[in-house]
Every structure is written in C-alpha cells, then in structure tokens.
Amino acid sequence: MFKFLNKILKSKKYENAEKKSLGTQGMDDTDSNKRDLISDKLESNMENLRSQFRNSSDLIIYQFNAESGSKFFIIYLNGLVNKDILNRDVVTPLIQKFTGTNIKEYACVSNLKEAALISEVIKAVLRGKTGLFLDGYDKAFIIDSSEWDKRTVDKPDNEMTIRGPKESFIESIHVNIALVRRKIKNCSLVVESLVLGKQTNTDIALVYIDGIVNRDVLAELKKRLGKIDIDSIMDTGNIEQFISDNRLQPFPTVGNSEKPDIIASKILEGRIAIFCDGSPNVLTVPCLLTEVIKSGEDYYSKPILATSLRLLRISGIIISSLLPAVFVALTTYHQEMIPSVLLSTMADAREGIPLPAFLEALVMTFVFELLKESGTRLPMAVGSAISIVGALVIGEATVNAGFISSTMVIIISLTAVASFVSTTLNEAIIINRYLFLVLAGVLGLLGIVIGIILNLAKLLSMRSFDIPYTSPIEPINPTEAKDSIIKYPIFSLKMRPKSIAQKNLRRQGKMK
Amino acid sequence: MSKFKYLLPIIAALFLITLCGCWDRHELNTVGIVNAIGIDLDNKGQTKVFLEVKKHNVATLQKTSQGPSIQYFTATGKNLDEALSNVYLISGSSKMLWSLVRVTVFGEDYVKKEGIYQWLELFQRRIDAITDGYIIISKDLKSSDILQIGNNLQNIPSQYIGLLTKDSRDSTSKSIAVDAAEFLRNYYNDGIEASTSIIHEQEQEQILTQKKEESLNISAEGMAIFSGDKLAGFFNGMETMCYNILLSKVKAGTISIPENENSFTSIELHSAKSKYEIKISGNKITVNIKIRLSCRINEQIGNVDLSEPSVIKKTEDLISSVVSRQIDNTIKKAQHEYKSDVFGFGQYIARNNPSAWKILKDNWNNTFSQLDITNEVDINISDTGFIDMPASLKK
C-alpha cells in the first residue's frame, strides 16, 4: 500500500519538476550574463546592485573618497555586519592612507577576497559580508565582516543528561561546526559545504572524518542531496524527509541530535553529520535501530548501569506500543490468562462501563495524545491548566462517573509514562499503538502476533543508506553487538561498528 | 476514480473496528467467572451442578462491606455436559469461564454412581474448559452443602476451601491436595491410581461467635482413593500421613508416639524421603521401602533426659518402629481392602523394568494386593528444641 502511495507521490513530483525546470529556463538569457561582469565604473556597478536588490531598504551602499582622491563604495545588508570593524579597520585606513592600487595593504582585515562577478558579490552580501568597490578597477573585494545576533550556546532542551557535556547546538552553522571541531582536533575532519533552497540559499555542511567515513554512504548521500530541488530549507527536518530511505514509514532512518558530543562520537564511528544553517538539530546518517535505545550518557557511566538503562528503554518501547492492545486482547478474548483474583477486581471495575474495552482503550489513547499535544503547544502561562484538567477531569471524574474503568486509566497512564522513554521512536510507537489496538480488538492475541510479524518483516527489510537497519543484531556481528542491547565496558569496545565504518576499524590499542 | 480504488481497502479495514463482535469476544463484565463447581446427584438420579460464580459489584471509591460478591447457580441435566450448558439458561452470562475454577467438589454419591469419567471427558475435550484447581470429594455430604459454607476468615467459600485443602496438607500432612493436573497424571499413568482430597463434616462444639445455628463444620483430614475412575475408599488422617511419607511429600506434620501409660513423645517431621527397592526374580516380586525421616522433638512428657545420646537413640528406635507399623497397616489396607496401588509401586516397575511391566500390567491390581511389602524406617532426630530435659524433670 505504501508502495502505491509512493508511486502517486513520485508521479506528481515529476510533473512539478518538469513545470519548474521549464519556468527557470525562460529566465536564463545571455543579457544577464553580460550584466554579471563587474565594470570599472563605480556608478554602473552601484546601479546594477541596487536594481538586483530591488532597492531594498536594508541594503546600505555608502560611497566615500580617500584623501588621495580615489573613489570607493561599500555595500552590505544592515544587521548582518559588524559596523565597528568596518568603520575602524576598512573605511578609516582607506580614507586616510590609500594612495596606490592594492587594497590589501590598507584594509586591516583577515579575510579579504577578490570577486570578478556581481553575482558573487551578491551571494557574499547575502551571507553578511561586505563588498568593496574601487573606481577604475573591474573587480570587487569581499570583506568578511559578518556578525548578527544569535542564541548563546546553552544546555540542551530535549536531550538532558546527568553526566557528560551539557552544551548544545544553536541556530548558527558556523558555531555548530566549531563546537564539533573543538571535540575532534584533527585535520582529517572534513567540512563540505553546499547550498540548498532556491529562495532561501541555506548553507548546508556535511561533516565527516576522511579515512573513517564509509565512501559508499557519502556518495549516496551526495546523490540524494543533489536531487533535492526545493525553494526553501528551514530546518534539518526538511532535509531528513528528502534523504530518508523509506519516506513514508515511521521508523527513523536518519538520526538527529542537538548535542555536539553525540554528533562527534557518531562522526568518529564513521557516520556523516549534516548541518543546516538555522537549525539546532544535526542529522547523522546512516541511522540504525539500535541507536534508538542508546543515550549519550551510556558512554559516560558504568556498563552495568548503562545496560540496565538500555533494557529499561526497550521495555518502555514495548510497553508503550503493546500494553493497551494486550490489555484489550486479554480482557475480551483470553480471560483465562488473567489470574483469578486480578480478574475479579478488573471485572468489578468494568461493571457498568458503557463502552466496550476496545473502544474505551481507543478513546483513552486518543485523549492522552490530545493532552500531550495541547500540553506541548500551550503557552507556559496556561500550561498548568492542562495538567489540572488532565489529572482531575480525565483521571478521576471519568472514573467516578463510570465512563471509564479505573484499570483502563492505569493502563493508559502506564503507557503514557513508558512512551517518554524513547523520543526518537515516538512516531513509530504511536502508529503501532493504534495498529496493535485495532488488531487486538478484532482478533485478540492472534492480531497482536500478526502485528508483531508485520513490524518485524518491515524492520528486517529496511535499510538505511544500504546498511541493514537491524544490524548488528540481524545480520549478527558479535564485535559490533557489544554495543547494542548490552553495553560492554568502554575498554572492550576496541573496534568501530563494522557495518558503518567498514575500514580503519580499530579505535583502541591493546591494553597494557 | 482509479486513484481512489486503492483507498477502498483502507476504508474497508477501518470498518472492521465496528465489526469487533467476533465469535469469541466477550466483554469482561458479561463473563461469568466460575470459582467453584459442585457436582451431585439429585433425587431423580440426574446430574446436578452447583456453581459459585463471581458477582460483579460496581467498583466505587467508598468501599462498604457488601458481603461476599458471589452468587450461586444450580442446574440439572441427564449428564454433566447437559447440566453445565443448562447453566446458561439461568446465569445471564455470555460466557462461563471454566478455566479459573479453584475447586471442583464431587458429591460422594455422584462419584459412586457415575465415576469421574464424565468430568474427565468434558474437561479435556472442550477447548474452553481447561481447568485447574483442586479436585475434592465431599464425603457423606452434598457438594452444594460444602460450597455454601461460611467462614470467619474468608467470605468466599471457594477461596476458603482451596486454602483449607492446601494449608492442611502443608502444615499437617494429614490430608492431600490434588489439583486437576496431578489427578490426570495419576489417572493416566501406568501403575499408579488417582487420589483426591476429601472434605467431611467434623463434630465441633458450638463457638459463640458463630451466628448460624445450623452452620456446618468441615475438616479436610484424610483422602479418597480411586481405582480406575471409581471411588475405592478413604484413608484416615494417620494413613494419609503414611501415604505422604511414602510419596516423599511431607512438608510438616506431627506424630505423637506413646511410650507407656503416662509418657509420650511428640515429633514434628520436616522431611521424609522414601525409596522403593523392587526385585523381580521369576514370578516372585519383593518390595522393600527405605524411608528416611528427619524430625525434631516438639513435646516430651515423661521422665526422659534427652541430653543423653543413648536416650535419643532409644527414642529414635521407638519412633521408627511405630511409624514402620503404621506404614505397614496403611499399605495392607490399600492392598486388601481397596486393591488400589495409590503408592505407585507399579509405576516404579514400569519405569525401571519396562519389560517386566509389560507382563505385569494387565493384572497389576491383583498382583499388588498379594505383594509382600516390607519397610525400613530410619529416623533422625535433628533437634530437641531449646531445652534438653522435659519440663517435668526440673521440679
């Protein structure tokens, strides 16, 4: 069924792509190529740039003369540059001292480039740089003066840890890459930049370690990124949907994190990180199923604790997707499987409840999702109202009124608590919860088994960038499995995950 | 339209939700949870079942004592199956849940007339009637009388009877507790006969706190012995303890042994291990049972100083001779009176000497009744308690 939906979507996409390519071809003509060259006349360049920026009011073009008589103008976008640097280190020395032709001798900046095309200048200006034009010279100079307001590096909002680094990414791609660079002080850490989005021109960076990275994955990733033809990229979430292996199924095949230490350790395992300007979440590919039960903290705490926490997370995932379904199946089909004392208590609780157990569970699951969604979207000030309504009205009043049985409230709240254990699998868990519930309501435990088989078949057939999704458990790889469900101590994890890195595997020497 | 035709299966699948009234789906509050089954004969000789079924009370926050939340249903039929299905005529449940039955009580008259095979057939053949719980025979009583008994500790009779059966076995060894699985195992296995626990009336002085004048006092002492599916007879308390010793099932149990007119020793068994030694040479079968008992002195009346090892030895000899005689009597009773090998001598032969068993199999109960069985009891007093000398010696 998903295949069919894919087909529909693909055919639609091709239609759109054809339309788009037709549209862009019309604009491309030889006239614009001519205008792109920088002329040696200051006035014509100024005019050209003004018209290119459509006289936008935040575009600053400032013309000044040196004491020696040379004419200059600088161009930048208001709010994207540090004017102090510009005034002190570029404009002042040029006005006072400029005599010759070589600007580099006078402008006191560390990053100065020459550009021959107007379009180059425009690109730079849009990224917060300043263009400097000299009368009688057919090239422009691009000065890196960019600076704008951004959030400071702070504690992560979503990935809390007790132990380990507590900084998290911000919305600036340069700061984010620098945060990773500070973890991996190694010149083979490669940052490859590209620009995506026809309108937004968003900076994207692929970060990996040359010599560890899996070349096939890198080539595949570049191929997929190259296919993206979209007008805007706002967040890594947009990219994720394009590069995922199977775009319509709920299991994540692209990982993400907001912590530099996690991204750095994933890069060190041979993965590729995808940074996007304006997004505090960094993607990593490939992403395997075992990653959903790992937490950064596992590597900083002792192995027994880490293992037990992983088992806890697995049980949380199982409980939150299966518990309501198993409850419905047991109470409506397989009463003999419930111990008799518990059964009589549960039968008492069900007495006089108007809805069948299946619908009761469905309604309560729905209400819980409703509460969760409104709780996350509500402004802080009214946030407490939701919890009161949730706890009092849904928790107690419905039971007292006899609409919902008290056992069902326990089951759903247990499910809710368990569902917060793994946030990465959230989507899959919610979809599976409904799937299992319907199957259990119709077929009992048989339905649950059918659901589990469907899920297993799906998981086992999935691949993330051509690497089996369930590895290292299936196909089994004992060395790599040391860091899957059971976490071995760090000194026994001598090899990088083989399924991902594939070469340069040893990461620890022999212990003395 | 071609696009929408793929949506049709999805929509059709969504309709399945409304169809969830499949053949074996039952909401919990419409299920009759059967706690206990009593099976009797009525006056016309028909089978009469007596069911204790859970009554659903609306769960409220203010729990008041609503009395026992059970109700009784009784129905008759030509056979057991008919009687049980007639229950649906009166119970108002969509499904009677047979699998959580705690006790199944057979009236003595029913077992004597019908045997137990109807129950065996029914509860093994029917998929919805897998049952566990204890099998009990009510001696001299109707099972319905027992299932309506009240007790101060437990409100629910089935719960009380179930606990009584188990606890009396565990703490006195003067009764046995046989659940359905064990009963079936003994019934079907070669060379051992089935046995069940019994419940009978016990004379008891009226206790002031008891409200009902006609209240029935029951006891679980003793056991019932089967021969095939027919009831062969009963053992009393002491014989049941010997049965438990022979099958190494003793967890605790007190035996009181008189030494002379004024003195006796009371011992508490904590473990009993028995080992059969059966030799077959030609037509002659000799059976010897080696029993190792471990016990402690609970009470000692008489002028005996137990700090002396020789005295302990003497006491041990006395006890072992008494126990040995008791065991001998018990086996003789099973041999001659009931002709039923509940102790599993045949099973021992079947397991250790299958070729000999093939010949013996057909006429085993007769062979068993003529066996010459000896036993050796080896007793070990492990503990005399906190005091050595009897309290009476300290005067």
Image (cartoon, coloured by chain):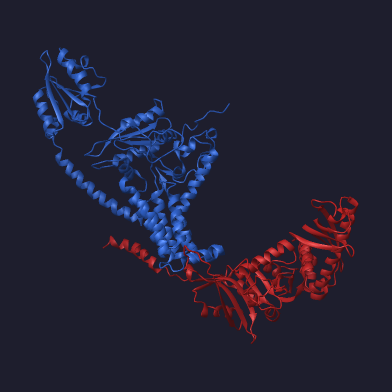
Image location of residue B30, percent across then percent down = 48, 71
Chain with blue colouring: A
Quarter the C terminus of chain B occupies: bottom right
- Residue B146 higher or lower than A494, as above or below: below
Judged left or right of residue A86, residue B7 is: right
Q: Is residue B61 visible?
A: yes
- Residue A160 higher or lower than A434, as above or below: above
Q: Nearer the viewer, residue B181 or B389?
A: B389
Quarter the N terminus of chain B occupies: bottom left
- Residue A113 higher or lower than A498, as above or below: above
Q: Residue furthest bottom?
A: B44
Residue sitting at 45 percent across and 61 percent down?
A406
- Res B364 → quadrant: bottom right
Judged left or right of residue A480, residue A119 is: left
Image location of residue A401, percent across then percent down = 40, 64
Q: Nearer the viewer, residue B114 or B212?
A: B212
Q: Nearer the viewer, residue A219 or A478?
A: A478
- Res A38 → quadrant: top left
Image location of residue A161, percent across then percent down = 44, 38
Judged left or right of residue A311, residue A428 is: left
Q: Is residue B132 visible?
A: no
Image location of residue B40, percent across then percent down = 64, 79
Chain with red colouring: B
